[in-house]
Amino acid sequence: MAYDILGKGALDYFPCRYKTSKILFRGPKRDLSGPYVAVLGGTETYGRFMEHPYPELLEADLGRVVVNFGCPNAGLDVFLHDPMLLKLCNSATDIVIQLPGAQNLSNRFYAVHPRRNDRFLRASSMLKYLYPELDFTDYHFTRHLLGALQSTCGQRFDVVRKELKQAWVGRMKGLLSRLDKRATLVWMSDHSIGDQANDALGSDPLFVDRDMVEDVRPFVRDLVEVVLTPDEIAVGQQGLVHSEMDVAAAHMMLGTLAHERAARKLLDSLSNHRL
């Protein structure tokens, strides 16, 4: 991954692997011989540009090992395709899952890379039939692809978006069914669940609405919502550590205040459910 290569002003993420998992996680590597909390998630959970991402802050407050299983740009597929990771989660005392968007998962219209889920691999025959005017070799990332589909024809794009939403619910239920204990979900975003315009390619979790979350809610232990205002995001971004070349990428992150708030809310959630 490009941002694991250190440059001036960049963080050392101490990348590591756990047992036979193929995913490269953020370190330092944690000791799994005792009780631990497993945290699954995407770029925010990984803590890009963050000195102390929320799993680390949670560990300090909780007094137990918290393992950061965050994977940059992860959709649900990266977790479902790694049997060792699921085994490690099932050995944890608690499981936390940061809710991902619906764009980075394979579906009936397109396939994504099994570990780098933001990478578009190929269009299905269904998508080629739906958009015969597009040359899909021009696209390498899911958001780039979706932007092209939307701008080409909004009506046909509605069909793709509906498929992604349905696939997300099915895949989330599939993940939850493979866990031995009920997980705590974390919503981290610049908007509340269901507040984003349905026709926009906005911020993550992309396309995930209230109905989708409520559909999986009966299968989880708790839902923690962390929503930041634009001013809070701007303040939090001042605490990010990055090189000059990563300024634009850093402005896409939620910032330090989001991680502090997520750690506090998760501490309350995990502590309350142990009473």
Image: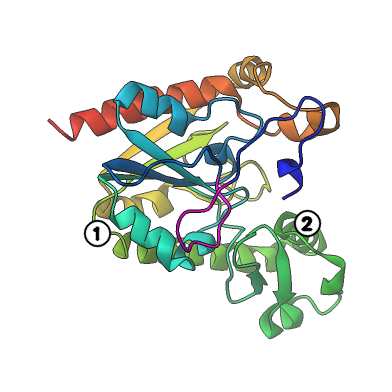
Nearest the eye: 209 or 49: 49
Is residue 154 shown to the viewer in this render? Answer: yes
Q: Which residues are magenta?
A: 16-25
**Residue drawn at 45 percent across, 65 percent down:** 80
- Magenta-drawn stretch contains 220: no
Report the amino acid beneath label 1: Asp
Horizontal arrangement in the rendering, residue 184 relative to residue 10 (left or right): left
Identify the residue at horizontal 60%, vertical 45% (top origin).
15
Question: SS of the residue at dot 1?
Answer: loop
**Residue tagged by mark 1?**
180
Q: Where residue 84 appears, x then y in whole percent? A: 42, 63
> Badge 2 is on which residue?
144
Please report contact status of discs 2 and 1: CB closer than 8 Å, yes or no.
no
Indicate the amino acid at tag 2.
His
Image point (78%, 56%), residue name: 144
Name the image quarter holding residue 221: top left
Pick the residue in front: 217 or 271. 271
Of the two numbered discs 2 and 1 on the same chain, state the one appearing first in sequence.
Answer: 2
Q: Position of residue 9 (x, y in %)?
A: 77, 24
